[in-house]
Image (cartoon, helix red, strand yellow):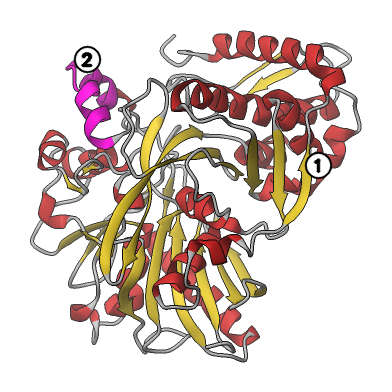
Amino acid sequence: MTNGVVVAIDAGTTGVRAFAIDTNGVPVGRSYREFTQYFPEPGWVEHDATEIWTVTQTVLAELAAQLNRPILTIGITNQRETIVVWDRLTGLPKHRAIVWQDRRTAAYCAELMAAGHLDNVRRTTGLVLDPYFSGTKLHWLFNEGAVAIDENTMVGTIDSWLVWNLTGGCSEVTRSAAVHITDPTNASRTLLYDIRIGAWSSEMCSLLAVPMDVLPTVVPSSGRMGLTTASISVGAGIPISGIAGDQQSALFGQTCFTPGDVKNTYGTGSFILMNTGTTCPEPVEGLLTTVAWQLSENGTPGPHTYAYEGAVFVTGAAIQWLRDGLGIISSSAEIGPLAASVPDAGGVVFVPALTGLGTPWWDPQARGTIVGITRGTTRAHIARATVESMSYQVRDVVDLMAASAGFPITSMKVDGGASVMDLLCQIQANQLGVSVARPTIQETTALGAAYLAGLAEGVWSTLEELQSKWHLDAQFEPDETLKTATAASYETWKRAVARSLNWQSE
């Protein structure tokens, strides 16, 4: 076992990464490929699930070619609320996957709100009525879209789709033995799962007109779930033993195992999670309650660990928009140096509500706003305003968490693509007034999935052993000399947000 590796499949919003670590937790290989983004109508975002599976096979093959040692186990982490519907017999999707960013069900969510369902939805699922979550997407597919339900209809988030293919669904010969599962972290993002009892909710399924028999079986986040089939590049018989939605996986990868531990991932969006322990907390206005993970204990499912979550829909995606939409930068790597080339944003504030606003506003009708532009405004100022907007949105969430949780927040661990920017981490520390810690291994989302799988297969024995593998790269402390300016800039941010709210309905 000491010569083997643990592999994580990180199926994100824009691409798939295959990532391998050795038994010491040290990265020993990685491969990444992007896949196509589809925007059939304004506010609609779709993926081709078949392409995601093809890309997954490609990166696994590329990773396997780098490794000259056995793969002990595979863990999976994924974009969470994106939903796939496929046919059990043909193995083909019945519709493009509808992505978590998609806003097509905003009007339906408003109808459910008006009918008085929010309180029950929040208490049962920990979520709010927003197009972000999978359940209303399934309602659209089954009741307004082009998907007909029959006895061979299967539904799942991206983890379910990948496990089904890895365990035989990719081949007609082995398809009947393929495993149809998900874990509680992904199930808890569907609006269909009762997070208090740990099972699909017949009440929520009835409300959203989703038949329960199309849903996957929910299994613990860590535990043997199935074996790979010979039809894939890494070969047959490798246990798949860990699953977690990307943000919960990052919380686990950051070893935030103690109630009160907080992490933020700067990805396409930003997702702030705080471990709240094994007791499901009461709903808090503006925050989500979610399952952080469920471990197995001697082969028996253990208790759920819960988390408060704040979801910021657009952070890294705003950088992509500067690159692809406006042409202000030619590569995402330019944003940090360009933003750092000016001492401040020159009065410019960018509210990147490109697909609405998440926590704490939950306003699908909000739209992107740039205010404070003058003749002196340059692309550097807009770049700086984009970086600052990331820190403001995270502060919106953390302030609410701190007021609600009863746990003191003394630091925050960060990861994700934009966390490599020292400028962003320093601005974030200034805005929060607490230290910001960045680990040496940035792929904490993939790391969490690998840890979950390795725990199940005995590669590592305890959470304490995993914590010993977390190493600090850099720590950023609040600059007290900027305290007044920091407070003033945040007040300006809130004024700008007020101008972006409820824009679409006007």
Q: Relative to residue 119, is residue 222 depicted above or below?
A: below
* Residue at mark 2 to residue at mark 1: CA–CA distance: 45 Å
What amino acid is found at the position of numbered circle 1 in the picture? Asp
Residue 500: image x %, image y %? Answer: 55, 14
Asked whether the viewer can see residue 13, the reply is no
Mark 2 — residue? 114
Q: Residue at x 55, y 54 (%)?
A: 255
Position of residue 257 in the picture relative to residue 388 (left or right): left
Give me the disc on residue 422.
Answer: 1
SS majority, magenta: helix
Residue 410: image x %, image y %? Answer: 64, 33
- Among the two numbered marks 2 and 1 on one chain, the one whose residue lies closer to the N terminus: 2
Q: Relative to residue 268, is residue 23 depicted above or below?
A: below
Q: Relative to residue 460, is residue 1 depicted above or below?
A: below
- The boundaries of the magenta stretch are 108-125
Residue 41 lies in the magenta stretch: no
Q: Are marks 2 and 1 in contact (CB under 8 Å)?
A: no
In-front residue for pair 93/195: 195
Disc 1 on helix, strand or loop?
helix
Q: Residue at x 61, y 36 (%)?
A: 315
In-front residue for pair 81/285: 285
In-front residue for pair 484/166: 484
